[in-house]
Image (cartoon, rainbow, N blue to C red):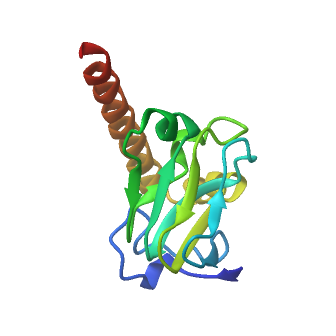
Amino acid sequence: MKTQNCKFCENSCIFNGIDTTQWLQNTNFKSGETIFTEDDSVNGLYVMKKGSAREFSSVDLVLNESTSQISNGDIFGHIDYRGEKHIRSAVAIENSEICLFTKEKLYDLCLSYTNLSLKLIKFFAAELSKSDQRTKVKYKA
């Protein structure tokens, strides 16, 4: 793991432009390598810096449902963020560089950058709304 800084990142995620040197960790994953699996402890929030991955659950595989595609600038692992264990798995589908904000460091970062806190609230609210819409569509059929 190496330290990165979102202040100079070319991606357009919500952390872009923020000095994250003391809060962010960065890891490389090879194509096919597991990033996290169901029932692993939740370490924090992930951002795809470069590459792509797929997030899925064992239920998705059994029901043959589509899984979510992750590409540059996307945040993932957030569905499990409040919990202690991941409810989904993530696998790199090409060589990828992934940023990790541990829970503790993300809290500190939000205390230092209140504008980021507001962006994260909006992000989580939008994701909750998307999840609600998917559930409604699934149970109408």
Q: Quadrant of residue 72?
A: bottom left
Query: Residue at position x 37%, y 44% from top?
Result: 66
**Where 76 sits versus 24, above or below?**
above
Residue 90: x %, y % from top left? 56, 56
- The image shows residue 84, relative to residue 98, as above or below, that is above
Residue 60 image point, x, y percent: 47, 38
Relative to 134, residue 30 above or below: below
Name the residue rendered at 39%, 32% in the picture. Answer: 128
Q: Residue furthest top?
A: 140
Q: Residue at x 46, y 75 (%)?
A: 49
In this rendering, position of residue 23 left or right of residue 41: left
Quarter of the image for residue 22 reads bottom right
Q: Which quarter shows the N terminus?
A: bottom right
As rendered, which of 42 and 89 lies closer to the eye? 89
Up the image or down, 107 lies above or below 126; here it is below
Callout count: 0
